[in-house]
Structure formats: C-alpha cells, structure tokens
Image: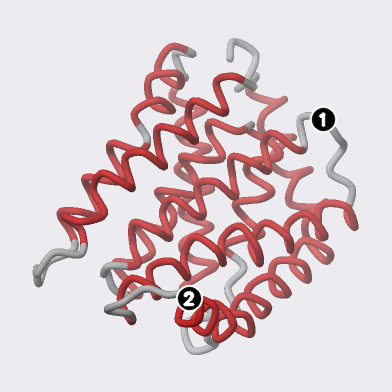
C-alpha cells in the first residue's frame, strides 16, 4: 500500500511540475507526451525490472496492449464507446497493479497515433494507467466476478478516468479558472464519460469473465507470474 501511495504521489507531482511546460505555446505535443509517459512510469518500470520479467510475460503484456488499442480503433466512428477500458480493467485484475498501469498508459499513448496526439494525451495515459493500477489493487482483494467487475469498471472509467481527462479540457478551454467554469466543463463531460463507463460495464458484463479466464489460462500454462 505504501508503494501504491508513493507511485501515485510521484505521478501527481510530476504532472504538476510539467503542467506549465505542457500548456506552453507549442505546436507539438508528442515530446511532452513521451516525457510524461516515461517519467510517470519510472517507479513502475523500476519495480517491474526488479521482478525480472520473462519474454513470455512481456509478450503477454504487449498482446494485451495490442488488444486494447484495436478495441479502441474498431469503434473509431462512435464517440467514447470504446472497450479499451474493459480490456485494461481485466488486464489489471489478472496481472496486478504495476502491469495494469503500464498496459493502460501504453495503450493510451499508442492508440493516440490513430486518434491523434495532443494536450489530452498525457492525461489519458495517466488516467488509463490508474484504471489498470486500481483494478489490480481492488481485484487482489476480491474475486473479479462478472457483475462486481462490471460495476467497478464503470466507476473507474466514468469517475477516475473522467475526472483526470476532463482536467485537460478545463486547462484548454478556460483562461481564468473559476469554480463556475470548472463545473461547467465537468458537467458537459458527464454524458461522454457515462458512455465510456457504460461501454466498459457492458463489455465486462458480457465478456469480462471469459476474457479473464483466457488470460489466466496463459498465465498458468506458461508460469508467467511465478517469479513476480
């Protein structure tokens, strides 16, 4: 739990420190996106490296990232209706908090080469990373049953993801931040966040248990987490 708190604290401090530079007058957001991606993942990467991941583990994580990216891309024409949240929740539940964060962050960054990089990218990386992280923490304590997993997935993608990503809209759309302007933007984002949360709920309800069984079967068959 102490490690979790320290990870989140580091991420928030880094975001705060780099916020001004990110929103400075710049036409390229690839560099700040990469910088935040790398720096925010340092504690996770260091801890992950200490676990000495096998090639099989890295392959599984890469495969889950690819599935997450594809799950977002295939629904390109439907705003916010993206199963990527469900994939990340299931990944975090199976592989734990650290791997869940890395899968979420990389999925957001890579999929934005399809959807477009921008000021919002660092926020999406951190938000989806934390969805995976908290999924790992929560489902290390409770069993990921279908309905429970669907409800938790909805709350993480609607509330946690929504709060973090909508912050980018607040900073982009307001010159003078006030409670009224912040609340207006957040309320405007509620329908979009509801769609994303509902999509996560539906996909986890329909396919979550089956997907987790597939992942766990691979983990057990190849002994992927035995030394972690």
Please tell me which residue is depicted at 20% across the width and 56% down the height of the picture: 20
In terms of secondary structure, where does tag 1 sit? loop
Towards the viewer: 222 or 150: 150
Residue matched to label 2: 182
35 relative to 182 in the view: left or right? left
- Crowd class of label 2 (few under 14; some 14 to 19; many from 20; radius 10 Å): some
Say left or right for 132 vs 129. right
SS for dot 2:
helix
Residue 8 x/y as whole percent: 49, 35
Tell me the quarter of the image containing the C terminus: top right
For mark 1, does the 10 Å Cα neighbourhood hold few (<14), some (14 to 19), or many (20 or more) residues? few
Q: Could you tell whether 226 is left or right of 213 in the image?
A: left
Location of residue 192 in the rendering, given as x and y in whole percent from the top left corner: 59, 82
Image height check: is 9 above or below 128?
Answer: above
Q: CA distance from mark 2 to mark 1?
A: 35 Å
- The residue labelled by disc 1 is 141
**Residue beneath the point at 49% across and 44% down:** 103
Say which quadrant the N terminus sits in: top right
**Residue 104 x %, y %:** 50, 49
Task: Find residue 169 and report its image quarter.
Answer: bottom left
- Residue in front for this viewpoint, 178 or 80: 178
The coloring applied to the image is: secondary structure
Q: Nearer the viewer, mark 2 or mark 1?
A: 2
Q: Disc 2, disc 1: CB below 8 Å?
A: no
Rendered location of residue 98, percent (x, y): 53, 31
**Total tally of numbered discs in the picture:** 2
Residue 221 is tagged as none
In the image, 158: left or right of 184? right
């Amino acid at each position: 739990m102490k490690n979790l708190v320290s990870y989140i604290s580091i991420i928030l401090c880094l975001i705060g420190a780099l916020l001004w530079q990110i929103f400075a007058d710049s036409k390229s957001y690839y560099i700040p996106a990469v910088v935040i991606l790398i720096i925010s993942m340092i504690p996770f990467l260091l801890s992950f490296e200490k676990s000495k991941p096998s090639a099989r583990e890295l392959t599984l994580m890469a495969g889950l990232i690819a599935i997450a990216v594809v799950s977002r891309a295939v629904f390109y024409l439907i705003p916010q209706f993206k199963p990527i949240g469900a994939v990340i929740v299931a990944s975090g539940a199976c592989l734990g908090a650290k791997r869940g964060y890395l899968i979420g962050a990389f999925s957001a960054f890579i999929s934005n080469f399809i959807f477009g990089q921008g000021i919002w990218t660092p926020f999406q990386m951190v938000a989806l990373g934390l969805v995976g992280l908290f999924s790992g923490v929560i489902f290390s304590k409770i069993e990921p049953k279908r309905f429970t997993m669907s409800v938790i997935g909805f709350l993480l993608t609607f509330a946690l993801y929504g709060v973090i990503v909508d912050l980018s809209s607040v900073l982009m759309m307001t010159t003078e931040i006030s409670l009224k302007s912040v609340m207006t933007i957040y309320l405007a984002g509620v329908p979009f966040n509801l769609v994303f949360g509902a999509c996560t709920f539906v996909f986890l309800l329909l396919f979550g248990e089956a997907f987790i069984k597939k992942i766990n079967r691979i983990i057990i068959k190849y002994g992927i987490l035995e030394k972690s």
